[in-house]
Amino acid sequence: MGNSKSPAAGRPGSSGGGSLPECFAKPGPGTASKPVWLAAPGTLKKDLKALPRAQANWLEAQGWKAAAGSVVLLPGSDGAVAGAVLGLGEEDDRARAAMLAGALPRALPKGNYHFAHAPQDRELAALAWAMGSYRFTRYKGNGEDRSSNSEAVGQTNESPRRLVLPEGVDAGGLASIANAVTLGRDLINTPANDLGPGELEQAARNLARAHGAKIRVITGDALLKRNFPLIHAVGRASDRAPRLIDFTWGGARARKLTLVGKGITYDTGGLSLKPTSAMVLMKKDMGGAASVLALASMIMAAKLKLRLRVIIPAADNNVSANSFRPGDVLPSRNGMSVEIGNTDAEGRLVLADALALADEEKPGHLITMATLTGAARVALGPDLPPFYSTDDDFAEAVLDSGRALDDPLWRMPFWAPYDARLKGKVGDVNHISDGPFAGSITAALFLKRFVSKASLYAHLDIYGWVPRAKPGRPEGGEPQGARALFDYFRGAYK
């Protein structure tokens, strides 16, 4: 991820396939590796009973307490590093404990390593290693070609830290998930001067081409001719034309899954201009699009028995003489007139037209992923995205998948009484509520107004960003919810 120090191979926008990421080494008699021990405070002696006595004495002399994510290097008789110990702390959650393995790649010297004893969840621990190996280095160093994020990733002149995969781990499946996370992170991390609607379209084309999906794109004024007035209104102020990206994959008779991702490649707030402090991270406002592309990559690589459709409304929300205005009343694809309360709530507008298109096909599952509201962050913070669903069984299953993979979500309600807060004074609906309360819920309810035919609708109000690094999650872009949703669909439609 990132051009020079990524764990995954491939091109941004491609799947990376099932090729083994650079951060893994294939097990075999010719692969020399050093052991990594896992230890918790309450079972320290038991966990390290097979440790050579000299190393055990040295560890005890350090007063090491096995704090969660702490790593201690173990010396050999020659003074060189002979292995390491990873602290698991008092963590009693199996998934979070496995994700602590993501602390290892940044703490260990270069070389090959293996787990001295298998983690409880060996597949997730191996994935955490890959996720912790991520580096976004496109803009680092001198004399590098920085012109395109489509350069092969995973290439480096340095010998990396490689993990010998634990026995029983599906290397191909693990690689596909790691590569998909790479794709999502790289897209979100790329600054807006190098990733606009056109570059987002190219990433989708690369991914579609890699899996034989059929893609079509409607660009600029053609959006008006094809009845996508809200997407056009949001993007018309930019010199980078807005567009609707739409690709399909899979058998026509399979269960229809449609993913819709918010693709605002930069958000100034429009005429309701953001302050600089709120604008500086707005390259990540296409995090929903990046997340649905990451999820689509996982689904297509696994060849799930689904008919997949991905729809991304892509645009910049800029300021110019033809910007849409607060107080404007705009038409939408499904005929509803939308009164504009604030031009900084543009994401739900582009999603509305995209949802109306998706709904026309009557999909079995219709899911939106979007960096939609600050209210979601106030309620649940950056790590726990709100998750809305019209189906209780689906919601519980996805929440279970999120807990099992440490890709957490939190169920929020489509609280019908709040829908009255969206009543328009001039138009059919105002796209923001009439007060400061329940902002994430009212945004979800606005989107739900454009869904009537799908069997099931779900919405994820993600942050798409890790503000403070933690094991397996470097600071930067993150396709939140993609792994949880994939786990559900893999179980249901393999």
Image (tube, rainbow, N blue to C red):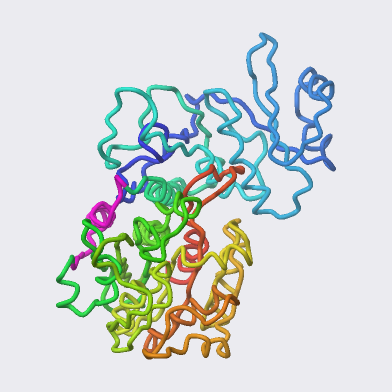
Q: What residue appears at the point 79 percent right and 19 percent down from the top-left corner?
A: 58
In the image, residue 402 above or below residue 414: above
Quadrant in which residue 263 is drawn: bottom left
Residue 42, quarter of the rendered image = top right
Tell which residue pokes out farthest to the top in this image.
78
Q: Residue at x 52, y 34 (%)?
A: 164
Query: x, y percentage for residue 256?
Result: 35, 77
Q: Which quadrant: the N terminus? A: top left
Magenta stretch? Answer: 193-218
Q: Residue at x 59, y 77 (%)?
A: 438
Image quadrant occupied by the C terminus: bottom left
Where is 17 relative to 291, above or below?
above
Residue 160 on image: x %, y %: 47, 27
State the residue in front, 98 or 70.
70
Where residue 16 sits in the image (x, y, percent)?
Answer: 34, 46
Decide which of 17, 370 is in the foreground and name it.
370
Is residue 341 rendered to the left or right of residue 379? left
Q: Is residue 43 left or right of residue 115?
A: right
Residue 309 magenta-highlighted: no
Q: Residue 50 placed where, x, y %?
A: 76, 29
Q: Nearer the viewer, residue 27 or 474?
A: 474
Indicate the quadrant where residue 293 lies: bottom left
Count of numbered badges drawn on the protein = 0
Compare residues 133 and 289 and report the one nearer the observer: 289
Left or right: 272, with 246 as reference point: right
